[in-house]
Amino acid sequence: MAQTDIVMAGFGGQGLMAIGKMLAKAAMAEGQHVTWMPAYGPEMRGGTANCTVIIDDEPIGSPIVRRTQAAIVMNKQSMDKFEPTVREQGLIIVNTSLIDRKVERADLKAIYDKLVQADRTQELAKGSAKGATATRTARHVRVEAAMTRIVGVSGIVFRKRPEIAQRFADCLPRTARPRKKKA
């Protein structure tokens, strides 16, 4: 596998750091070299946040990537900032519940999906976590499916490695959660 890199960007509180960590842990479980680099402001929720994950068979020289292969953008500000940084023929996954425009670059493959309900995202941005757990779980399932297309890492890793799955059990789809042993 050649180096794969992806940036995930949106508001703080949307679960982007957790999604990035899940991807990094899954790749590490498959024996890959990984970097996970978060970037966020001082706000608890609602500020800008992004993380970059790099996966490679070889040791990674730097966690900084100027042009990524893929981007998951959860809000318009992230779309405006990161669309120009995706490489030619790259992939961009757009959260249509908060972004009302199409990708402007014709050379990118774009996937449009309602990754999170707009009302829940606005609650998170305002700092209200009420009802956010179900939204996060649904979002993580969709983003995991998108990342599987990008890097080939899926929930199968979590089923094979229960010690990793246990740390993220509340974020994973039911089929990937660690199974309780029958008595």
Image: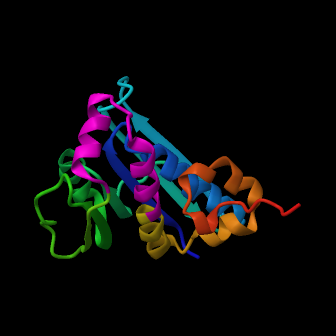
Which SS type dominates the magenta stretch?
helix
Q: Is residue 96 left or right of residue 14?
A: left
Q: Residue at x 50, y 54 (%)?
A: 53
Q: Quadrant of residue 15?
A: top left
The x and y percentages for residue 19 are 49, 52
Question: Can residue 51 be found in the magenta stretch?
Answer: no
> Magenta span covers which residues?
116-141
Question: Can residue 117 be found in the magenta stretch?
Answer: yes
Q: Residue at x 41, y 69 (%)?
A: 146
The x and y percentages for residue 51 are 43, 46
Q: Quadrant of residue 129?
A: top left
Q: Nearer the viewer, residue 88 or 53?
A: 53
Q: Residue 61: tell me if it is visible.
A: no
Q: Is residue 67 left or right of residue 95?
A: right
Q: Is residue 156 above or below residue 84?
A: below
Image quarter where the C terminus lies is bottom right
Q: Residue furthest right?
A: 183
Q: Is residue 65 above or below residue 148?
A: above
Q: Residue at x 45, y 72 (%)?
A: 150
Q: Quadrant of residue 102?
A: bottom left
Q: Is residue 18 left or right of residue 109?
A: right
The x and y percentages for residue 133 are 45, 45
Q: Nearer the viewer, residue 166 or 70?
A: 166
The x and y percentages for residue 163 are 76, 54
Q: Residue at x 39, y 26 (%)?
A: 44
Q: Is residue 50 above or below residue 30?
A: above
Q: Residue 167: tell me if it is visible.
A: yes
Q: Residue furthest front?
A: 183
Q: Nearer the viewer, residue 168 or 108?
A: 168
